[in-house]
Image (cartoon, rainbow, N blue to C red):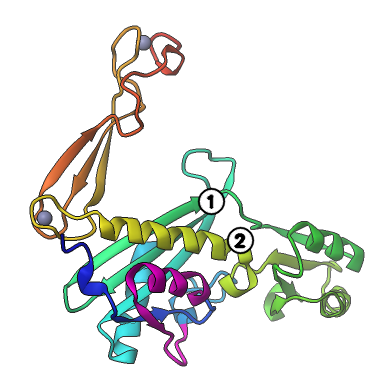
């Protein structure tokens, strides 16, 4: 089994300037004996930021791919890892905020791309307009300050100023006081700093996505042994236990190979062969 053996003892450029390598590099070293380097002067902000000065172009995965290719070009290495995060409602539970991280591996010599992914509802993503230092400190305490940093946006729309990476109380109090004095409505916009080096919760999700990447690398195609044999499609239609009609629950996953195109259907991926009548549209409309 060649399972990702060609990655062993290679050098990977990690496309980050926010110390995400602290989450990614130890796992690569332990599982694949990959040595990581971080390119100097790699400005990932040009691919989009959370603090909205630069809008992200393209999807999360496209952005990660662009970062990985840029890191390869900058360092002259042939292997790169990039990660990209997003925040929004959980895909299955819309009212729950969540953090989705993707970690993408791009190997230029093998023309291989494998994507690890993790979704967590353990996120402190939050914002508030505050009108006093006390209110700001209470909000800060709630989001896990100072281990988790804050961003403050001060002033009015025409001349606003952004302070990032705020991680001590005196600094926060200063910014709030001057900010209140400067804005027409006497308020300052505060939000959680979601950059990885100011957000330990995010680093944990990046770690999970890196482990998922390793798992996917270890799944190889039964036909050609190419790594990254993974789910490419999901089919709903698990039959109801009573009436046997298809429900919206998952019936099968299709795993596919990006190299030779081989596909394999895996029935009952969640370990259940029937749906509960309570989950059936006909038995429990
Ligand atoms: Zn039914
Ligand atoms: Zn294959």
Where is mark 2, residue-wise? 201
Q: Is residue 58 visible?
A: no
The residue positioned 40% from the left and 81% from the top of the image is 36
How many other residues sit within 10 Å of disc 2, few (<14), some (14-19) or many (≥20)?
many
Q: CA distance from mark 1 to mark 2?
A: 9 Å
Q: Which of the 4 quarters of the picture holds residue 8?
A: bottom left
User: Secondary structure under badge 2?
Assistant: helix
Residue 242 place in picture, x, y as percent: 35, 7
In the image: residue 180, left or right of residue 268: right
Front position in the image: 205 or 67: 205
Image quadrant, ligand 2:
bottom left
For the residue pair 8 and 201, the one nearer the viewer reads as: 8
Where does residue 153 sit, x and y in percent of width and height? 72, 73
Residue 81 placement (x, y as % from top left): 36, 74
| Residue neighbourhood size for the residue with mark 1, other residues' Cα within 10 Å, grouped as few (<14), some (14–19), many (≥20) | some
Instruction: Assign the N terminus to one quadrant of the image.
Output: bottom left
Q: Is residue 101 visible?
A: yes
Taking the image as shown, residue 3 lies to the left or right of residue 30, namely left
Q: Is residue 30 magenta?
A: yes
Q: Is 174 positioned to the left or the right of 234 in the image?
A: right
Return the x and y of residue 254 as percentages of the image width and height. 21, 41
In which quarter of the view is residue 199 placed? bottom right
Say what secondary structure mark 1 lies in: strand
Residue 223 colored in magenta in the image: no
Residues tagged 1 and 2 counted as in contact (Cβ below 8 A):
yes
Q: Magenta segment range?
A: 20-43
The numbered disc on residue 120 is 1
Quadrant where the C terminus sits is: top left
Residue 47: quarter of image = bottom left
Decide which of tag 1 and tag 2 comes sooner along the chain. Answer: 1
């Amino acid at each position: 089994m060649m399972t990702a053996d060609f990655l062993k003892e290679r050098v990977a450029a990690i496309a980050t300037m926010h110390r995400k390598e602290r989450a990614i590099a130890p796992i690569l070293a332990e599982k694949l004996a990959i040595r990581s380097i971080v390119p100097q002067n790699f400005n990932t902000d040009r691919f989009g930021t959370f603090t909205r000065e630069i809008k992200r172009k393209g999807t999360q995965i496209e952005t990660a791919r662009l970062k990985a290719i840029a890191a390869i070009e900058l360092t002259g290495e042939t292997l790169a890892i990039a990660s990209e995060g997003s925040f929004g409602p959980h895909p299955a539970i819309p009212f729950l905020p969540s953090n989705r991280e993707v970690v993408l591996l791009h190997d230029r010599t093998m023309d291989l791309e494998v994507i690890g992914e993790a979704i967590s509802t353990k996120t402190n993503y939050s914002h508030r307009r505050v009108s006093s230092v006390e209110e700001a400190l209470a909000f800060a305490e709630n989001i896990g300050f100072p281990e988790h940093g804050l961003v403050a946006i001060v002033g009015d729309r025409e001349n606003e100023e952004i302070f990032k990476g705020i991680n001590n109380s005196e600094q926060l109090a200063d910014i709030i006081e001057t900010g209140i004095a400067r804005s027409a409505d006497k308020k300052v916009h505060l939000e959680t700093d979601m950059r990885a080096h100011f957000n330990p919760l995010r680093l944990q999700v990046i770690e999970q996505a890196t482990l998922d990447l390793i798992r996917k690398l270890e799944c190889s195609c039964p036909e050609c042994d190419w790594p990254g044999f993974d789910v490419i499609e999901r089919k709903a239609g698990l039959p109801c236990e009573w009436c046997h009609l298809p429900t919206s629950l998952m019936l099968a996953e299709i795993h596919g190979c990006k190299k030779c195109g081989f596909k394999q259907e895996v029935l009952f991926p969640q370990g259940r062969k029937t749906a509960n009548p309570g989950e059936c549209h006909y038995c429990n409309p």
